[in-house]
Image: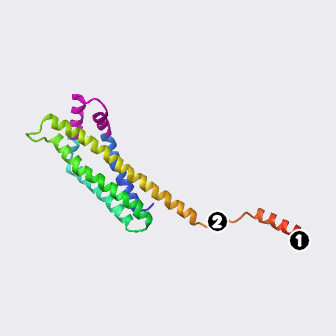
């Protein structure tokens, strides 16, 4: 495993960790009856994320960049493996970032700092959309991990197939020589 693959795996694992932290709220919002307590917990949770210091947001965006640069660097080899595995991984990673930017950020803004014309129903809808977006990002980032594991498996399988076949053990060769000499007599 090289530095580029390590950058991809670290970036994806970091974001999956963040999303699995959010899954405790997301599961309750999406799969359980939506009570006032569940809504309030979700709003408080995502408000905390939205109001985090700028350094945390900058770190998250930097880790996104590391993942993209790692995938583009791996794609630069331009062989069949890179085109299939790394190209598809790059598409899934960019899709996850697009969901984050188009769904996650606006929905978080609606929850944490609602405009004057936004009602409680708008906040509940934003909470549901944000939870669904997080679930979609988990699937996309999970696909990146599966594709990277598949690439490594294929690479090892190719290396094993390209390796020379092991020689026959000497005991078998000696046995064959004895049989040939017995036939000659």
Residue most extreme to the bottom: 184
Furthest residue in direction left, as rendered: 116
Closer to us: 82 or 53: 82
- Quadrant where the C terminus is found in the figure: bottom right
Tag nearer the camera, 1 or 2? 1
* Number of marks: 2
- Would you call the spot at circle 1 few (<14 residues within 10 Å), some (14-19), or many (20 or more)? few
Q: Quadrant of the N terminus?
A: bottom left
Give the Cα distance between marks 1 and 2: 31 Å
Question: Which color scheme does this rendered protein use?
Answer: rainbow
Question: Hey, which residue is sitting farthest right in the picture?
Answer: 185
Magenta-tinted stretch: 23-46
Q: Residue drawn at (35%, 50%), measured in percent from left and top?
A: 141
| Residue 91 magenta | no
Label 2 neighbour load within 10 Å: few <14, some 14-19, many 20+: few
Say which mark, if any, is on residue 76: none
In this picture, residue 34 sits left or right of residue 113 = right
Residue at the disc numbered 1: 184
In this rendering, the answer to whether 145 lies above or below 83 is above
Kindly identify which residue carries mark 2: 165
């Amino acid at each position: 495993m090289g530095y580029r693959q390590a950058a991809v795996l670290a970036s994806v694992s970091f974001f999956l960790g963040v999303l699995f932290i959010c899954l405790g709220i997301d599961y309750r919002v999406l799969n359980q009856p939506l009570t006032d307590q569940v809504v309030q917990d979700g709003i408080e949770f995502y408000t905390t994320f939205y109001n985090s210091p700028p350094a945390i947001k900058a770190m998250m965006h930097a880790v996104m960049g590391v993942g993209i640069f790692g995938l583009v660097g791996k794609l630069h080899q331009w062989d069949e493996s890179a085109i299939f595995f790394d190209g598809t991984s790059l598409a899934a990673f960019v899709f996850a970032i697009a969901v984050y930017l188009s769904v996650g950020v606006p929905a978080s803004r609606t929850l944490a700092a609602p405009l004057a014309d936004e009602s409680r129903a708008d906040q509940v809808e934003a909470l549901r959309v944000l939870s669904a977006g997080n679930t979609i990002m988990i699937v996309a980032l999970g696909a990146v991990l599966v594709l990277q594991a598949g690439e490594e498996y294929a690479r090892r399988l190719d290396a094993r197939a390209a390796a020379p076949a092991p020689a026959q053990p000497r005991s078998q060769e000696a046995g064959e020589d004895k049989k040939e000499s017995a036939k000659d007599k």
